[in-house]
Image (spheres, rainbow, N blue to C red):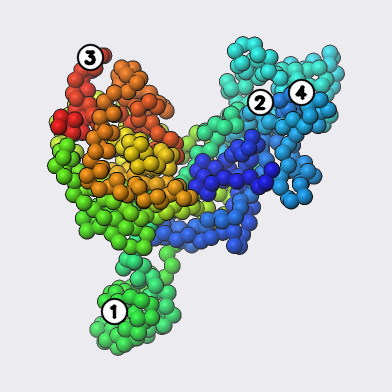
């Protein structure tokens, strides 16, 4: 086959470093950044929102290729069921003349070069390591040497058979050895595997794996568990996402000026003059003005900006104006806090990477009371940076595996860029406050347990949101609107993505951005931003809210106290509110369409529902 390919948008998630991706029936492991081709292959990406956090690191986008490795190595033939360990050496031996990878095939005479299938299961630990399952042990776990004789791992020939009994569960899956011994996979998913973790990442140097929670044996490695090869719990990516909102701002102008060597020389001379004047900077600024005028023209900024930057730098020490050290871990919520006022600016925005044109909603459907403004985002740029990943359990107790996979951390992180368009809606703070006050008891009853559960799992910090009832309402409405927009503007639902802006109860604000999430041609067709015009968007909102009143899963869907991942949803299922994983940034949790369109009635279980935020829309 030619070189395996995936879309560039998938390289950050779900197929980032350390993940398994299936391409044309074959399974590959994405290796660490230390193995990626350098030079022209890595294109630098800059975004102002992440600059302070990244220093001295950079963001790099691979333009040609990334390093991969076939994993798992164990395959089986669907015809004769023989298991074969297909390693990188076999790939090299069977390379085609054009350098393309071979497709693993069975060498059995009767199989006629049947395509080999990767084994379905792998082993993973909570420290982020992944390994092959010891299939030889499973074939010989009930081995009787007196009956079958000794069996060497080097000479053993294994077969993976499925008997068809027991409904196709693990007890019907059998590993059989040529020595006559065999064992089924019953119990493989019930607890830790018998093998020990060796700190393995395919193609990388093994590291030390230590179970720090094991008080009886603190030096022991973490236990390994079986995971299906396609399981989403094998790879939880930590991704930071930012819109490029800075444009040609004052901050950018100052950075351009500070990079000028003549400006730095002028600043140094001015500091010496100010010291001679006892700290008075008046004469130093006056003497430096001619040079600043020339520098402003050459750099391409105004004299006012140049003077403002010069005065700020003159009043600080040289150490303070130099490169800043890494600012520590940046939170997704802090980035959203920076973006919201820019998108909600009543004057709009017109910069290189963000064009936003606000309009007031009309009184139609009463939407002028629910929203402050609609914004047509005709152009935007989003940058997603891959910070690392965890396996099986996302917890602060478990280390984040860096993109270098244990090698020395490089001075860059893998990233990708999306150019697109969108629609932004700013909610009315007074309307939200009134809605929550009038329905305080019912809203508390419908959201409290889910918010507590999310906090216990650490989701707000990891995913970047403020956990409160307003967030659940805005998030639920976002899914309804996203589905409706995909019907009305021609985009597939997987091409659209949500961005939720929600403040705390003490500092409230709420907004919603639906935008294109593809880096290819479907990323900017122009149809989505056109839907931001009030006369179009109002109809879309009405249809979205109307559809949320009923689900084909009702009354079960509507009346469940908990459903979905970790029971963190209420009235939300695949038939009404869930969207593709690539579209939802919060893993389809904390959703409840009753908060959108509920009418305050008692449901079939005798529980009074809250009145939905958009209930008045349906009364018109």
Q: Which mark is residue 80?
A: 4
Q: Earlier in the sequence, mark 4 or mark 1?
A: 4
Q: Which mark is residue 194?
A: 2
x and y, in percent, of residue 264 in the image? 40, 79
Query: Which quarter of the figure has residue 257?
Result: bottom left
User: Which residue lies at the image location 56% right of the left edge and 59% below the top edge?
Assistant: 42
Q: Earlier in the sequence, mark 4 or mark 3?
A: 4
Q: Considering depth in this image, is 477 or 47 the residue closer to the camera? A: 477
Query: Which SS class for mark 4?
Result: loop
User: Which residue lies at the image location 35% right of the left edge and 71% below the top edge?
Assistant: 254
Q: State if disc 3 and disc 4 touch (CB < 8 Å).
A: no
Asked whether residue 465 appears in the rendered view, the answer is no
Q: Earlier in the sequence, mark 2 or mark 1?
A: 2
Query: Which SS class for mark 2?
Result: loop
Looking at the rendered image, the disc whose residue lies closer to the viewer, 2 or 1, is 1
Looking at the rendered image, the disc whose residue lies closer to the viewer, 4 or 3, is 4
In this rendering, position of residue 376 left or right of residue 124: left
The residue identified by callout 3 is 606
Marks 4 and 3 sit apart, C-alpha to C-alpha, by: 59 Å
x and y, in percent, of residue 83 in the image? 75, 28
- Categorize mark 4 by other alpha carbons within 10 Å: few (<14), some (14-19), many (20+): some
The residue identified by callout 1 is 303
Which corner quadrant holds the C terminus? top left
Query: Which SS class for mark 1?
Result: helix
Marks 3 and 2 sit apart, C-alpha to C-alpha, by: 50 Å
Q: State if disc 2 and disc 3 touch (CB < 8 Å).
A: no
């Amino acid at each position: 086959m030619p070189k395996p390919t995936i879309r560039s948008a998938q390289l950050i998630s779900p197929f980032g470093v350390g993940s398994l991706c299936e391409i044309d029936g074959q399974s590959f492991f994405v290796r660490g950044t230390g193995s990626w081709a350098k030079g022209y292959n890595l294109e630098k990406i800059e975004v102002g929102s992440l600059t302070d956090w990244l220093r001295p690191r950079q963001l790099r986008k691979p333009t040609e290729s990334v390093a991969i490795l076939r994993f798992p190595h164990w395959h089986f033939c669907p015809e004769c069921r023989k298991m074969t360990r297909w390693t990188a050496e076999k790939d090299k031996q069977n390379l085609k003349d054009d350098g393309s990878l071979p497709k693993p095939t069975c060498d059995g005479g009767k199989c006629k070069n049947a395509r080999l299938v990767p084994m379905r299961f792998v082993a993973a630990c909570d420290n982020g390591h992944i390994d092959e399952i010891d299939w030889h042990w499973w074939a010989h776990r009930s081995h009787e040497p007196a009956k079958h004789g000794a069996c060497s791992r080097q000479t053993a020939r294994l077969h993976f058979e499925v008997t068809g009994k027991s409904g196709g569960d693990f007890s019907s899956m059998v590993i059989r050895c040529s020595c006559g011994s065999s064992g089924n996979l019953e119990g493989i998913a019930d607890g830790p595997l018998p093998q020990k973790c060796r700190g393995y990442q395919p193609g990388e140097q093994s590291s030390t794996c230590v179970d720090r929670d094991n008080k009886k044996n603190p030096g022991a490695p973490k236990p390994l568990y079986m995971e299906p090869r396609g399981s989403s719990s094998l790879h939880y990516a930590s991704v930071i996402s930012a819109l490029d909102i800075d444009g040609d701002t004052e901050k950018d102008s100052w950075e351009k000026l500070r990079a000028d060597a003549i400006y730095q020389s002028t600043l140094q001379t001015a500091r010496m003059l100010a010291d001679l004047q006892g700290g008075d900077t008046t004469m130093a600024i006056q003497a430096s003005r001619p040079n600043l005028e020339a520098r402003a023209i050459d750099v391409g900024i105004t004299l006012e900006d140049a003077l403002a930057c010069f005065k700020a730098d003159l009043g600080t020490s040289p150490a303070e104006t130099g490169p800043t050290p890494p600012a520590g871990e940046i939170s997704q919520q802090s980035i959203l806090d920076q973006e919201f006022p820019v998108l909600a600016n009543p004057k709009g925005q017109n910069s290189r990477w963000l064009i936003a044109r606000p309009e007031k909603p009309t009184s139609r459907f009463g939407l002028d009371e629910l929203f402050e403004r609609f914004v047509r985002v005709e152009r935007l740029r989003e940058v997603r940076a891959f910070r690392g990943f965890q396996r099986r359990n996302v917890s602060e107790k478990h280390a984040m595996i860096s993109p270098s996979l244990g090698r020395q951390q490089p001075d860059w992180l893998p990233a990708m860029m999306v150019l697109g368009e969108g629609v932004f809606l700013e909610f009315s703070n007074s309307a939200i406050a009134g809605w929550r006050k009038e329905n305080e008891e019912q809203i508390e009853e419908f959201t409290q347990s889910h918010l507590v559960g999310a906090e216990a799992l650490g989701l707000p910090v990891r995913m970047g949101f403020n956990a409160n009832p307003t967030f659940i309402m805005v998030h639920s409405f976002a899914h309804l609107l996203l589905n409706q927009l995909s019907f009305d503007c021609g985009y597939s639902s997987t091409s659209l993505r949500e961005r939720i802006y929600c403040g705390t109860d003490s500092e409230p604000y709420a907004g919603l951005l639906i935008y294109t999430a593809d880096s290819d041609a479907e990323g900017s067709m122009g149809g989505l931003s056109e839907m931001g015009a009030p006369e179009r968007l109002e109809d879309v909102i009405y249809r979205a809210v109307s559809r949320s009143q009923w689900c084909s899963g009702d009354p079960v869907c509507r009346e469940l106290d908990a459903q979905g991942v970790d029971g963190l949803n209420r009235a939300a299922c695949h038939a009404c509110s869930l969207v593709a994983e690539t579209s939802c940034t919060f893993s389809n949790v904390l959703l409840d369409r009753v908060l959108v369109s509920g009418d305050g009635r008692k449901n079939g279980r005798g529980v009074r529902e809250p009145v939905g935020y958009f209930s008045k829309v349906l009364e018109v």
